[in-house]
Image (cartoon, helix red, strand yellow):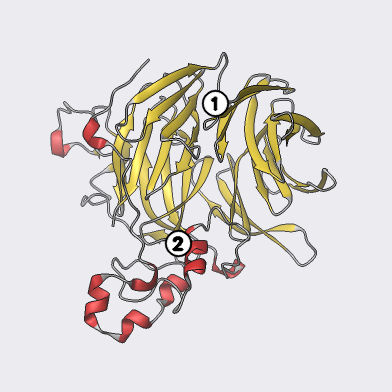
Amino acid sequence: MEIEADERTGYGNKRIHNRLGGGGAGAAASGSDKSNRVCFHWQAGRCNRHPCPFLHSDPGTSSASSKRQNLVWQNPNSNGGYQSSNWGKGRGSRFNNGGASSSSKVEKLCKNIDGNCPFGERCRYLHTWSVGEGFSLITPLQGHQKVITGIALPSGSDKLYSGSKDETVKMWDCQTGQCAATVTMGGEVGCMINEGPWLFVGIPNSIKVWNVESGHEMVLAGPTGQVYALAVGNGMLFAGTQDGRILAYRFNELTNNFEPAAALEGHRLPVISLVFNNGRLYSGSMDKTVKVWDLTSLQCVQTLLDHTNVVMALLWWDQFLLSCSLDNTVKIWVTNEAGQMEVTYTHTEEHGVVALCGIIDAQSKPVLLCSLNDNSVRLYDLPSFSERGKIFSRQEVRATKLGPGGLFFTGDGTGELKVWQWTK
């Protein structure tokens, strides 16, 4: 099935606006010494001035360190200098509701958001997919019939990939926004990730693998039931399965194939989230725990018990592990002097948290996408957790993905994929 989108909404050539070093034309022309001073509020993670007259980087920052900051989500081992005591400072909202007062609008989508609302501007419900400043919707991509469970952007390809419980993977042309191809999986897609040119798709009882550059395909056997989570680290592919096991596969260059390497056992219920960092694998499960696995010994070295409901997603940022749960919390974990993980901050929502994604805004500052089961996504500055916007959908967003050039993507329960852009 091919789904055509409006060609004028092509998003393949967008570029991110980088304000590191305060090198804007206005700053250079002013000649003020402000252009050489670091913003105190930025250092604390809570600057809300747009534009800010001060630097949002350290003076004399080298190009190498600038690249490191731009890749804060991809480089969790970087020493960003963030302290545990900075978490949660400056909490609150610093965006307005599209010019409407909070008392005049209910933060719920109008059923007639697509048009023909009889109340027009007098409608008390929202007629926009988002509120907040600094980002906007580029285009919706429609074609999936069920919830989107994975979004991927393999290197060496000009296609955006989305996987769904409708048992398909769709390939979208990044220049036109059109669906270029649909591949039937033969089962519900439980998750999908990419590592370089490799695309990994978890389906019931197997993992399908493609190399988008060479065209090489394979099917990995071993899982029992649905594959809910995938991660790559230490030269291995890890799969979280419905029976509570984590299966490890190692790539054999001689056979050009992934071969079974180990099975990590310990969770009592399905493993639905995985993340790798610095030689360790972290797994979140329906059994309400997070387990820490040493990949040298392939043994569980710690079980984190602080959540009281299903652990839905895990994410590394700087030296911190973030975990979210249906218990309405996002917990921030740090390694103590004894080498054990402990909670340094707990962020509480009014609804269950189903997904996390780390992205970079137009000023190269880290932003957390926090998807809730009330069909909204909250955008927070880190580490302050200052709220800067909300995204709304007809059903909860289960898949998110950081893209190039200031783009990011969300996929919801209706099967709609949305493309968003940070604005300058």
Q: Is residue 247 above or below residue 338?
A: above
| Residue drawn at the location 64% of the way across and 19% of the way down | 204
| Residue drawn at the location 14% of the way across and 27% of the way down | 118
Residue 215 is marked as 1
* Marks 2 and 1, how far apart at CA: 48 Å
Residue most extreme to the bottom? 33
Query: Residue 111's spot in the image, x, y percent?
Result: 27, 27
Q: Amino acid at mark 2?
A: Arg
Which of the two discs, 2 and 1, labels the residue nearer the N terminus?
2
| Residue drawn at the location 68% of the way across and 32% of the way down | 239
Q: Is residue 269 visible?
A: no
Which of the two marks, 2 or 1, is nearer to us in this view? 1
The picture quadrant where one finds residue 215 is top right
Is the C terminus in the top left, top right, bottom left or bottom right quadrant? bottom left
| Residue drawn at the location 31% of the way across and 47% of the way down | 14
Residue on which disc 2 sits:
91
